[in-house]
Image: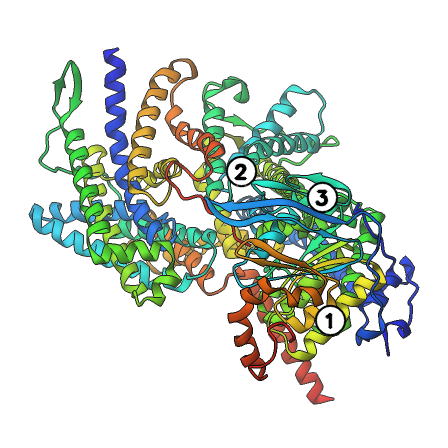
Amino acid sequence: MAAGVTWSEAEVAVALSAGADAAAAPRRPAEGVDPLLRLDGIHLSFNGVPVLDDVGFAVARGEICALIGPNGAGKSSLLNVICGVYRPQRGSVTFAGETRAHMHPERAARRGMARTFQNVALFRGMTARENVMTGGHLHRRAGLWRQIARTPLARREEIVARAQADRILDFLHIGAHRDAIVAGLPYGLQKRVELRRALAARPSLLLLDEPMAGMTFEEKQELAGLILDVNSELGVTVVLIEHDMGIVMDLSDHVVVLDHGRQIAHGAPEDVCEDRAVIDAYLGLADDQAADDGEGAGAGPLRG
Amino acid sequence: MTVFDAPLEPVAADRIARPARQQVAVAAITFAAVLALVFGVVPALANDYWFSAILIPFLALSLAGLGLNLLTGYAGQLSLGTSAFMAIGAFGAYNALLRIPHLPLFAGFAIGGVAAAVVGVVFGLPSLRIKGFYLVVSTLAAQFFVEWAFTKVGWFSNFNASGVISAPPLLIAGRDFSGPRGRYLLSAAVVVALTVLVRNAVGGDAGRSWMAVRDMDTAARVAGIPILRSKLSAFAVSSFICGVAGALWAFAYLGTVEPHGFDLDRSFQVLFIIIIGGLGSLSGAFLGAAFIVLLPIALDNLAARFLTGVVDVGHLENLEKIIFGGLIIFFLTKEPGGLAHLLARRWARTVEKLRRRRGLAS
Amino acid sequence: MQFFLEVLVGGLLAGVMYSLVAIGFVLIYKASGVFNFAQGAMVLFAALTFVSLVERGLPFWPSLAVTLLVMVAIGLGIERGVLRRLVNRPPIVLFMATLGLSFVLEGLAQTLWGSQVHGLELGVSDTPFEVHGVMVSQFDLFAAGTAGALVIGLALLFNRTRLGLALRGVADDPLAALSIGIDLRRVWAVVWAVAGAVALVAGLLWGARVGVQFSLSLIVLKALPVLIIGGFTSVAGAILGGLLIGATEKLAEVYLGLTLGGGIENWFPYVLALLFLLVRPTGLYGEARVERV
């Protein structure tokens, strides 16, 4: 059974209805409580090539923390360390009160962590519905034997899981694709299915790796609203990697900046974007971004 | 409408949408029809030749295909050791029935299956360290080792001098099922029962966990799916099924229990069954088995009718080889879903055409 | 002690033969990531074609030339007809396709040339001679020498020619190779053609040793443990692996066989490879793949 927040069906329905009014939802990062997630002195390297160098910060319960930095800064690798896919050479991860140098991903999931991947790690041979249903795996109590024998418990859990998955998919208009094998779905839809799979696990910590990549402006707004709902209504702590600075400023309570594996700044969004080191790191990138967005070259690097 | 205005739906288990009434009815009718066909129509119409040469091997191979499909098609663990597990099932059942007095026949089969499951788990253990294609080595090791063990260790064959043992009489509740019809009914009962169980396993969370492990085990781990336990359960269930299939093959089809009928070629045969039938599909096992059983017979008949004297037996075997190999390549390149997918699409198209015609008429 | 040495040497030389077949696998795997189960069938096809030509009266060298052409053609045909359609499929699927291919080739070979056993004469006698009191077969030495020459030739190809450089690039990262203008199809065609030629050499040597018969295609099964131990992508590994398997197989058969009965060599290499994999999941020389998610 997953630790962390347990939601009722009603809460799920509430959280996932569309058209969230982003500004209306106040954000309440918890104060004076132990952080849900803390990283200390993380060093990671592959075959001698350093990827992360002495990264350490804390994420408070109920917070939205954005992880930003130029490409190749090691952000995805950091998420991998947090959820246990990579084992750091040095340092420790403290999650839900438990400090370990390395936590197996299954254990992290059981303790309430869920994540999406940069390259959409869906189960390609399964349908959208099946993918979302696997997200709820930890809440299943009927094991293999009971499933084989089709006990009432197994049958009921299957029906509930199926209905949940359908509802999660129906909101935000991908219900029509429930039975489609995900390998055949367009990228944007795949990303949505993947997010819903992560939500089906009812996590206390949600790690999102570039969830808005490839989305239109409207889609980004919709997703931002969803993230805010999930955070404010259901208290899910979110760590997300994001390149769109506007989103970062709007959504996050706390920003961590990585560059070439090192943490060069962290703090409130307004402070971070004034930070000299961060501006330097982004200087080349920011001008490109400004040009893409059609703004004048005079716009500041981080005021998207 | 904001988040706060959305209607709150109280959700009690009995108010949750069940699978549509229509679907349940169709499934029930189909199942009843299959049962009627298998246990009513076929025994009435078929003759001894059909039972002995076609239906019984079809049933045994279908079951083996079901087992392998579970391991390779659903869980993605390639296995070339299928017939080793079949052999364990056959020898296990034989030894159980021999040494435990008054043991019911089905219990003997079950013991053979359990023995196969245990060995399956042992050879599946390396799957934690060894990924993907390399795992073939483990199942190949199983294949060769088991074949050798059953040949060398006399205890398994009850120290029979020739190493070939005849299957014990097939008695269930005192009635003799050793005749062709009896063996058919016995095999059909076993296959139907096990198919239902496999369907339950595959259609539920276990099946999805297996597929998740097959498709992307990193994401599966992150979703909390226990990788090792899933792989081992796949090996266990699959080997159990193959073990029972092996017992059927030996007891109901051949009438003898010997190791050489369970060699690497047999493993390949079962693999071909699921490739041709359709990887990851239950009906595929049956379609593939039907194909494998019927094609040589069809070829023989064709040759006898049109090519007498020109083509001899050896040539026919080679021709079969070429055809099977060619079909494997064809199905893998053009139609990865195998016969099952091919037929499903034809069926969908026919239904669509009928629906359109009915729509036009009304 | 002498007996031990004889068994060891015999095993090592047998291992060289395994290496020969394994090298064919390595070539294809290195360049296209495919484990070519049909390599054994190719070996059989080569041997059968050569022997049948010779038996029909064609002299040695022309037969060799024709067979070489046939093998290269088969290699090219496989690449173009089958493998090109399976680009981007998972390794399991590719493996199964080559499995199907092996059946086609075996059936074809035996349909064309019949299924009797043929003897193969390479003009090298099998008389044993003594080296420091240990009996060594002349033929085995010849085979070892041929294998060595083959390896040196391949090493030169890979390391000293532009084509070899392209091959290594394709093996490393096909997409990157494409982006710098390497013609993948040409590279794959060359690789399969070379694999066909290697199959011919292996077929001739094996055929001379055990006679040309159907079981030749089962050699592929022995090559698998060799590749697992030596890694799928290293020629040096194939040689080392072959030697290791050959030696341990013979030693196990002789020494373990005393207690356990004969036939050990059927499964021993596999169990050895399995145990090896448990310790080193990527073989002696294989590359450890870091899974980037």
Judge the density around disc 3: few (<14), some (14-19), many (≥20) Cα neighbours within 10 Å: some
Which comes sooner in the sequence, label 1 or label 3? 3
- Marker disc for residue A250: 1
Q: How many angstroms separate mark 1 from mark 3 (CA)?
A: 27 Å
Q: Residue under label 2, please give it.
A: B129
Type of residue at label 1?
A: Asp
Q: Are discs 1 and 2 both within one chain?
A: no
Report the residue marked by disc 3. A94
Depth check, front residue: A158 or B274: A158
Residue B316 visible in the displayed image: no
Which of these two is toward me, C224 or A44? Answer: A44
> Visible in this render: residue A55?
yes
Q: Are marks 1 and 2 in contact (CB under 8 Å)?
A: no
In the rendered image, the quadrant that contains the C terminus of chain B is bottom right
- Disc 3 chain ID: A
- List x then y, in percent, for residue A93: 68, 44
Q: Cβ–Cβ below 8 Å for labels 1 and 3?
A: no
B338 w.r.t. A103: above or below: below
